[in-house]
Image (spheres, coloured by chain):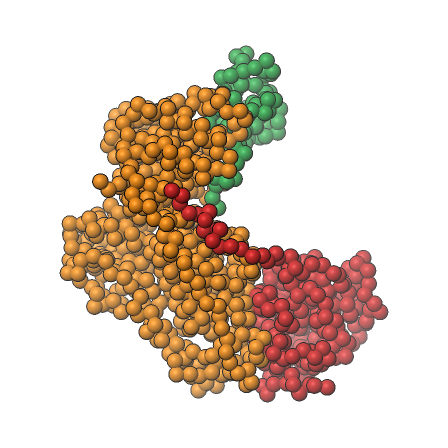
Chain colours: A green, B red, C orange
Amino acid sequence: MEKRCSKCNSWLPHIHYSYIGYCCRKGDVSHHEYYCEFFSELSFEEEFLWCESCKVLISQEELEDHLSRGHCLFRGVFVDRDYREEIYEG
Amino acid sequence: MKEPEYKTDAWIQWCPGCGNYGILKALRDAVSELKIDPKKLVIVGGIGCSSRIVYYIRGGNVHTLHGRAIPVASGIKLSNPELTVIVAGGDGDILGIGMGHFVALGRRNIDLKIFIHDNSVYGLTKGQAGPTLPSGVKLRAMNYENAHDAVNPLLLAFASGYTFIARAYAYHVKELKKIMVEAIKHRGSAVVDILQPCATYNELMTKDWFEKRVYYLESIPGEKVAIQKMKERERIPLGILFKAEKATFEERIERFDVDLEKVLEKKAVLY
Amino acid sequence: MKVDLSFVIGGFQGGGVESAGQIAVRAFAMKGHDVLGSREYHSNIIGAHSYYHIRVGGKALQMPLDALIALDAESVFTHFQNLKNNGILICDRSSLEKKASQIPSMSKALKKRIELSYGDFPLNQILEKLEFRLIALPMAELLKSLSKSVEKPLSSVSRALNVIGTSAGLYLLGVDEFTIRKAIEKQFRDPDVNLRAMEIAIEEVKGEKRGEIPSVEKKENLIVSGNEAVAIAKLRSQIEFLSFYPITPATDEALFIEENRGRVITVQAEDEISALGMALGASIAGLRATVSTSGPGFSLMNEMISFAVQAEIPIVITLWMRASPSTGIATRTGQQDLLHAIFSGHGDAFKIVIASGDHEEAIEDVSLSFKLAEDFQMPVIHLLDKYIASSLTTVARGKFEFSLPKREFKGDSESYQRYRLTEDGVSPFLPLGMSTMIVSSLEHDEYGFATEDPEIREEMMLKRMRKFKKVAESVSKRSYSIYGAKDADVTIVSFGSTKNAIIEAIERSEHAAKFLQLRVLSPFPDISKEIRGKVLCVESNAGQLSLLLKSCCRVDSVARKLNARPIYVDEVLMAIDDAMKGKEEVILSEGA
């Protein structure tokens, strides 16, 4: 299994920029091709998962379908801390 | 008695036997007892037979729209806390079209008094079922049996946050006056559900019908008993069912001094 | 050499476009130029596309763009067709691999249009065939070096990327580093990371050809959005009561007032009916009261408006129009409530409707509205729109230097008649608390008692009609403004935010054109003597002003903007040409 942050169980991709993400273990942002000694393989055990290709949360039932279409799945997603200051009323 | 000060010279248009006569007398007696200056007395009415009371009592009165007395009264009271502001409307007005405002007032606890003239029909439009008419009842002006069930104004007031909840009966003028006085003296949102017969359109809930069912509470019950009493339908408890002290909306808003120049500074282009 | 630029900064919502846009607007304002920053965003919390369209050296938007700062692939796809040849296109290198079909947040319709015109190819293949100055920044690497050079962990990735892209863009357009630095410092509480991002960006594009932005005469300006301008104007006008219900795009105005309210009573109502009801109650009690809302909320307020007319209660309602009908598009603009405003409230409900053309007019019109409402004791509807509400622009600080005196009440409270019949129709006003009285929604006599008497009814109708006539006399000198050629071949008639686009267009047009901007829409002024040549009516709706115009003059041509975007200068130029050619109707469709 190729070692990189984007295949690690502790890593959440940024909601918009696929090449950057947040490491829950280290509490810091890293490039998707980076990896460290704490690498552990990505497992899809959560009830809801983040499909990076569709930019939506999907349920376990939909997992099979998205994987078969070659989509990139993750355990969750990383949102900038201050995004609330950058949005407008809908 | 300073009663003449609160009379106006408008001809009272209510049908003979209308409970509104009792309510009018009690209200005039209540404000008279409290010695409220008519200039500082504000009666705000919606639309309906009962709301016409704004023409029959001397004050700075406002005749608004169907169901909308509460928002207008809220604006008035917040603007001038010295005024005694009383909302007078029918059950159709306050618990039908005006229901949203009735609940919202409970959440605010503004120092307003809501006197519901509750006769379970829409009198002025000729006798349709009102929000407090039970299902299955057919009154003379209705085409079919009532397909809606009655709302319970007391439980609703309790759930909304009113801090004074009482029920009274239009033709027991002395007791009604006493409850009105207590409601006016209370600090916060007060509602009095005043049951009344409609001599023209409600042939079920007549004077006799009420006299057989109403009884007075000896004292303000604790919360648990109060809720049970509010639910009672066979026999109707009258009196103050709930009273609490809670911060009013007026007390919850912070007013402070602001320097607009500082606000403009934040927006200035710096060179 | 006059600076005249038009550029777009685009990105995903929540991703820093707002900060980037503010920095850009501020940077140019700091050099002394006129700036307008129009914000376009989705009715969505996070993820959809949003952008700033910025104009420097003018107050209206125009195409084509001189530059496109696209912080993601969707921004490139959405705007590249509006970029001029040799225009600057700044984007993230990794965006170039993306195909339109791979972007979930992009609308299906837009994907289809791109596929039809260019095929479903990756961005770099599409851009190869076009002639832009492409500057593809290696954002991933730049972000790496930013991470390394700052001590704290990067929790705000998007903002940093935005600052990199925008700094590079501003630098290439010709803004100096010092100004960009100052603009960033003002934007963030903790600017260190972002200043470093700016340095990295400028380092990256150092070799590229740059424009030149000179400093010009510095005026005492503020940068405000329309919402803020009106909010500050209301505070200056000494309002005492504000009630509101949150609705896009009016909420920000109410929240700004609430935040800086001081002694103003502010209440968040449970619905718009209650909001207006409370404000009317406050007005009857003597306070200067106001509400602000948008189309759907205004629909709810209709019954209360009729009440205010019948009961003669002063009130100012600020109506921020948006794309309708019904919920429409909450976050986009339009001018579709003109007739709604004029004819709101059932019955012969006479009221005043004032429309502002831009931020500066909006500020003046706020105090004018309160004055008219109180002088004539009727509702005044102040008509604005989402485009003015959300766009940032430079406004002279002096525009806010005014104050409206508080309401004054004089009168004998003995046998006070709230609706006393007078020659001009206006009865002396005493608030509740100063006298006994009756304020009534029913037809009433002079004391306010309800009546059905035919003579009194007629008297009261005539009284209100007399009052309305007096309004017309009072506002006659400011009901419309004229711009352009005296002997024109075409007269453009319009109202509201089309103003600046039309003014610029008639200056540039080869035809002798004149612009009649309606400022007061009710009472509708007599404009017949101002008409010269062909009449072209420009508006962002299906034909509301043109309907009114037809009652007083011939309308030769109509230009309608229906796509929920603001009007651009070049569109108006085209409409003038079409009108002169004899075209009766043209639909304006610019804007992304």
Q: Residue furthest right?
A: B218
B266 or B237, nearer to the observer: B266
Picture coordinates of residue C271 (x, y %)?
54, 58
At x 55%, y 78%, the residue is C438
Picture coordinates of residue C434 (x, y %)?
57, 77
Question: In screen coordinates, is C158 left or right of C526?
Answer: right
Asked whether the viewer can see residue C169, the reply is no
Determine whether C87 is above or below C4 in the image.
above
Dividing the picture into quarters, in which one does residue A24 lie?
top right
C145 or C511, nearer to the observer: C145
Dividing the picture into quarters, in which one does residue B92 lie?
bottom right
Determine whether B108 is above or below C331 in the image.
below
- State the count of labels: 0
Question: In screen coordinates, is C137 left or right of C160?
Answer: left
Q: Residue furthest top?
A: A1
Determine whether C567 is above or below C134 in the image.
below
At x 63%, y 71%, the residue is B82
Determine whether B173 is above or below C508 in the image.
below
Asked whether the viewer can see residue C574, the reply is yes
At x 48%, y 37%, the residue is C188
Dividing the picture into quarters, in which one does residue C211 lie?
top left
At x 48%, y 39%, the residue is A86
C126 or C2, nearer to the observer: C2
Quadrant location of the N terminus of chain C in the rendered image: top left
Question: In screen coordinates, is B159 left or right of C184?
Answer: right
Quadrant location of the C terminus of chain C in the rendered image: top left
Picture coordinates of residue C165 (x, y %)?
39, 30
Picture coordinates of residue B85 (x, y %)?
63, 71
